[in-house]
């Protein structure tokens, strides 16, 4: 059975696309990793902590600015051939929602800039860039997401790599040449985001994916699908950001800097998770549209093979992490190793989570994810407070591992409720889902 899976056209297609996405996704998510040799030499641990806090705020703003519209458009792509459905109108109304959210967030941040600056340990007027960057990245990622579902990996890679290279070069210029410290990294990100906001809009217009017509029925449908996803995505982003805020308040900016470097090293697991998921999701949705008992068993076995692979990868990273630190970061950041074992195992749990969450997305039961997201954020806050109080900054890494693991188990359980699969009886025949 294993040989038949490895030789199947489905597996070959996934492997072919995953190979392309692995390189692209590695460059995309490894940008903080590539910048480590530079930033850790030009920034102090405290400055790196400030930068990490700013980037965490951008991640949260990105999710809120999107309001789940990109996910709704991607899901709508699979319905584009249905009668009376106007896909370009869906795209336009999704972007209209993004613009409205940008205006609201910008006003809110402007009014609260002093309070937010004190809370996040950031200069107040730099915080004003956060909503704008979040909006830009939302629009730019829409055509990239459509290239994914259209299974056009080359176009996706060209667009993504172009943005990565620009952001990398701008950041190096402002930090190294201009000597602008952490502010240079932020300026590089802002300039790149502005350029690719324009590129994204041009690609959508040239693909005839703009029907300039506001339709409140489409807006309602986007929000009904997207808002639960916002809670789901916010749950992930907040869990990945709130640890920095806790370390800032309970330990200090220098420890936040060390923790963030350890997080960047651990994200190597995330590179491969993201690449596989990009290749897997379109094929997975297509297979679920034509499911049968034999295919269910094959999907389960591929998933278990993936689980084993991601666990072994995380263990391998823990062993090689000391060498990576010696190669890529300045010696004042060597203390980051204490966080890596917990964070790498946490990313293994996240990797398993992204495989089982697709069943809930497919069934459009995104309200389940919003409930799980709220629960995991609450748990993460409790875990961070208690574990940091007793174990110091390493408690944040332990909180991340516990939260990611519990979220994986919860999504796996409820995913099987909405779309039953033979997870523990895959050697027996199962009934075909009608």
Image (spheres, helix red, strand yellow):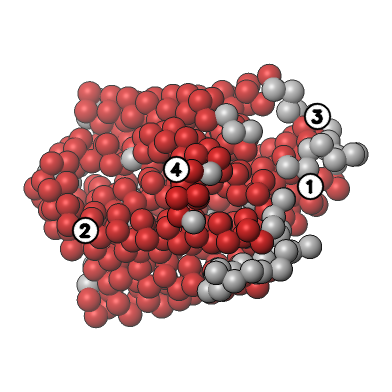
In this rendering, the answer to whether 193 lies above or below 217 is above
336 and 324: which one is in front? Answer: 324
Label 1 and label 3: CA atoms lie apart by 13 Å
| Lower sequence index among marks 1 and 3 | 3
Label 3 and label 4: CA atoms lie apart by 34 Å
- Crowd rating for badge 2 (residues with CA inside 10 Å; few <14, some 14–19, many 20+): some
- Crowd rating for badge 1 (residues with CA inside 10 Å; few <14, some 14–19, many 20+): many
Camera-near label (1 vs 4) is 4
Residue drawn at the location 18% of the way across and 63% of the way down: 338
Disc number for residue 318:
2
Residue drawn at the location 24% of the way across and 68% of the way down: 394
Work out whether residue 101 can be spotted: no
- The residue that label 3 is drawn on is 212
Residue drawn at the location 62% of the way across and 38% of the way down: 149
Disc number for residue 1:
none
Q: In terms of secondary structure, where does tag 3 sit?
A: loop
């Amino acid at each position: 059975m294993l040989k038949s899976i490895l030789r199947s056209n489905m597996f070959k297609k996934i492997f072919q696309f995953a190979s392309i996405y692995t390189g692209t996704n590695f460059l995309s998510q490894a940008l903080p990793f590539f910048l480590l040799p530079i930033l850790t030499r030009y920034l102090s641990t405290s400055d790196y902590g400030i930068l990490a806090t700013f980037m965490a705020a951008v991640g949260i703003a990105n999710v809120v600015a999107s309001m789940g519209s990109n996910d709704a458009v991607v899901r709508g792509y699979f319905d584009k051939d249905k009668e009376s459905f106007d896909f370009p109108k869906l795209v336009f109304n999704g972007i209209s929602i993004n613009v409205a959210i940008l205006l609201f967030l910008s006003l809110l941040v402007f009014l609260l800039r002093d309070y937010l600056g004190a809370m996040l340990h950031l200069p107040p007027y730099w915080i004003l860039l956060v909503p704008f960057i979040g909006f830009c990245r939302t629009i730019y990622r829409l055509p990239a997401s459509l290239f994914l579902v259209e299974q056009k990996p080359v176009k996706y890679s060209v667009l993504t790599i172009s943005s990565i290279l620009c952001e990398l070069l701008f950041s190096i210029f402002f930090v190294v040449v201009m000597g602008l410290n952490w502010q240079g990294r932020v300026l590089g990100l802002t300039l790149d985001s502005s350029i690719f906001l324009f590129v994204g809009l041009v690609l959508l217009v040239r693909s005839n994916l703009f029907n300039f017509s506001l339709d409140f029925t489409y807006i309602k449908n986007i929000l009904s699908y997207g808002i639960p996803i916002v809670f789901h995505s916010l749950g992930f982003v907040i869990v990945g950001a709130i640890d920095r805020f806790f370390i800032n308040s309970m330990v200090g900016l220098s420890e936040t800097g060390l923790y963030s470097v350890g997080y960047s090293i651990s994200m190597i697991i995330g590179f491969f998770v993201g690449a596989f998921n990009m290749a897997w999701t379109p094929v997975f949705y297509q297979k679920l549209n034509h499911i049968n008992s034999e295919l269910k068993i094959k999907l389960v076995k591929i998933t278990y093979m993936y689980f084993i692979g991601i666990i072994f990868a995380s263990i391998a990273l823990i062993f090689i992490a000391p060498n990576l630190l010696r190669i890529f970061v300045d010696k004042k950041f060597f203390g980051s190793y204490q966080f890596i074992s917990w964070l790498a195992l946490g990313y293994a749990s996240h990797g398993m989570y992204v495989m089982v969450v697709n069943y809930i997305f497919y069934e459009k039961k995104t309200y389940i994810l919003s409930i799980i997201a709220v629960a995991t954020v609450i748990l993460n806050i409790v875990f961070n407070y208690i574990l940091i109080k007793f174990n110091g900054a390493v408690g944040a890494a332990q909180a991340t591992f516990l939260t990611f693991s519990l979220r994986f188990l919860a999504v796996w359980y409820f995913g099987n409720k909405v779309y039953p699969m033979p997870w523990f009886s895959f050697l027996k025949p199962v009934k075909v889902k009608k």
